[in-house]
């Protein structure tokens, strides 16, 4: 008689070997092969800066005495249009390869780990979230790239928390040049009015608590434009959750 359990385990093992052969295990940071599976080596993990103590409105790390309600001077002077924001890691030379491999390389073998970091950073806001909504790509960019990394992060976040996902809640209906290399003012002008809530999802957004998911926040111009579209559709609360947060303007190379 065939042992079904053994058969299933063997099939899994075979599939794993095949995946390992096609895409060998390697570090998400250094790209070194031959580890115990995709991930981050302890010495790399120690160099990543997790944003545990950040401004609750923009996730910027705060160096002064921190409390969960702390707000940075920039947000005190001019609060952002969303309610709260959290980021998993600081965007720096250590986290950059992780972000770029996901964004431009389409490497998703470490996705569950990245989503776990993100979910941990946003655990308080996710408890009171009705829908996760990713920042969308214009369909031309989506066709060229073949995937939307923010949608991957939102799907993973939904899977890990059980929160509902509106993967196409927002649409980027205007194609805009890349934000890379632009000043804050240019970035805001570039994406102003580029997003809208899909008409068929308006009733899902109205009166709901939305967590907008993005891979990286640089100046917040994209998040601001998405936020405006969600507010226009009647969202009751809008929080931001991102994988990485750029802090210094000269870090902006994405
Ligand atoms: Zn702030």
Image (cartoon, rainbow, N blue to C red):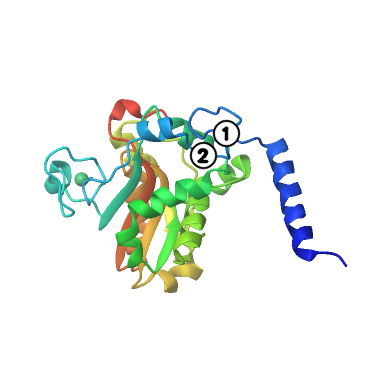
Q: SS of the residue at dot 2?
A: loop
Q: How many marks are shown on the rendered structure?
A: 2
> Quarter containing ligand 1?
top left
Q: Quadrant of residue 125?
A: bottom left
Tag 1 residue: 35
Mark 1 or 2: in front is 1
Q: Which mark is residue 39?
A: 2
Determine crowd level at label 1: few under 14, some 14-19, many 20+ residues with C-alpha closer than 10 A: few
Alpha carbon distance from label 1 to label 2: 8 Å
Above or below: residue 210 compared with residue 203: above
Labels 1 & 2 near each other (Cβ < 8 A): yes
Secondary structure under the numbered disc 1 in the rendered image: loop
User: Height in image: 153 above or below 89?
Assistant: below
Q: Residue 27 vs residue 88: left or right? A: right
Q: Is residue 153 above or below residue 204?
A: above
Task: Name the residue at 46% across, 40% down.
Answer: 176
Residue 121 point in image, percent of width and height: 33, 51
Q: Which of the pair 7/105 is nearer the observer? A: 7
- Residue shown at the point (34%, 58%) measured from the top left: 123
Quarter of the rendering containing residue 62: top left
Q: Position of residue 84 (x, y in %)?
A: 26, 55
| Residue 39 drawn at (x, y percent) | 51, 39
Image quarter (top left, top right, bottom left or bottom right) of the N terminus: bottom right
Name the disc covering residue 123, or none.
none
Q: Position of residue 249 (x, y in %)?
A: 29, 29
């Amino acid at each position: 008689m065939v042992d079904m359990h053994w058969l299933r385990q063997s099939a899994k093992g075979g599939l794993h070997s095949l995946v390992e052969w096609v895409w060998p295990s390697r570090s998400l940071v250094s790209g070194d092969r031959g580890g115990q599976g995709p991930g981050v080596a302890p010495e790399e993990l120690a160099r990543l800066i997790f944003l545990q103590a950040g401004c609750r409105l923009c996730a910027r790390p705060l160096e002064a005495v921190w409390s969960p309600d702390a707000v940075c001077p920039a947000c005190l002077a001019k609060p952002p249009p969303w309610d709260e924001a959290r980021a998993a890691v600081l965007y720096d030379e250590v986290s950059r390869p992780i972000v770029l491999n996901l964004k431009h390389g389409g490497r998703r073998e470490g996705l569950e780990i990245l989503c776990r970091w993100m979910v941990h950073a946003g655990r308080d806001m996710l408890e009171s979230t009705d829908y996760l909504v990713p920042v969308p790509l214009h369909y031309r960019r989506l066709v060229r790239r073949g995937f939307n990394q923010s949608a991957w992060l939102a799907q993973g976040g939904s899977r890990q928390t059980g929160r509902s996902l509106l993967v196409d809640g927002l649409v980027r209906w205007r194609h805009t040049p890349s934000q890379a290399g632009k000043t804050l003012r240019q970035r805001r002008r570039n994406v102003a009015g580029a997003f809208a809530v899909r008409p068929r999802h308006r009733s899902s957004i109205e009166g709901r608590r939305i967590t907008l998911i993005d891979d990286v926040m640089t100046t917040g111009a994209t998040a601001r434009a998405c936020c405006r579209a969600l507010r226009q559709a009647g969202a009751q609360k809008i929080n931001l959750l991102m994988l990485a947060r750029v802090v210094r303007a000269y870090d902006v190379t994405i």
